[in-house]
Amino acid sequence: MTSEAFTLIYNKALDLVSRREHSRHELMQKLNKRFPETLPIIEEALDKLVLNNILNDERFAEMYLNSRARKGFGPKKIEMELYSKKVDSIFIGNAIEAYESWIENAENELQKKFKGIQPADYKSKMKQKQFLFNRGFSAQIIERIL
């Protein structure tokens, strides 16, 4: 039964990873939900995926960051989302440092939301700052573009 269960779990993991990148923790949760009470077998399958470089948290962090940044989210928000997916902080830091278009992304989001209207008074400037802050952009980036 164990080799049968391992094959079943491993193939399901391959199926999930073939659709999109997953963090190890994320894949563990999905497999554990589908195959309860087989945690040691799931761990073994995940170890094999990592060994074969099919499952890679560093690659996941980069892909996730690029995907979320394209949707207009800033580094702080993406960092928190990756932490919630239990990605190692070293991988998160490396991915955020490697991405170079944060200012451009913030400007694009501001343009989309406020149609290029410059803040005329304190209240409108704070509204734009708050918008960018909620999107996950840091105070340094916000100050630089406003």
Image: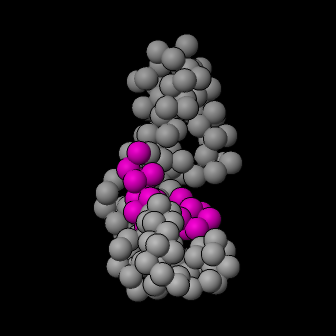
- In the picture, measured across the screen, residue 135 lies left or right of residue 92, that is right
In the image, residue 71 sits, relative to residue 46, either above or below, namely below
- Name the image quarter holding residue 43: top left
The answer to whether residue 70 is seen in the rendering is no
- Seen at 49% across and 40% down, the residue is 26
Give the magenta range.
62-84
The N terminus sits in image quarter: top right
- Name the image quarter holding residue 130: bottom left
- In the picture, measured across the screen, residue 88 lies left or right of residue 52, that is left
- Seen at 54% across and 48% down, the residue is 22
- Seen at 59% across and 73% down, the residue is 109
In terms of depth relative to the viewer, which is nearer, 143 or 37? 143
Percent position of residue 139, x then y = 35, 74
In the image, residue 97 sits, relative to residue 83, either above or below, namely below
In terms of depth relative to the viewer, which is nearer, 76 or 7? 76
In terms of depth relative to the viewer, which is nearer, 46 or 80? 80
The answer to whether residue 49 is seen in the rendering is yes
- Name the image quarter holding residue 140: bottom left
Please tell me whether residue 63 belongs to the stretch shown in magenta.
yes
Percent position of residue 113, x then y = 64, 71
- Seen at 47% across and 61% down, the residue is 134
Percent position of residue 136, x then y = 45, 63
Please tell me whether residue 55 belongs to the stretch shown in magenta.
no
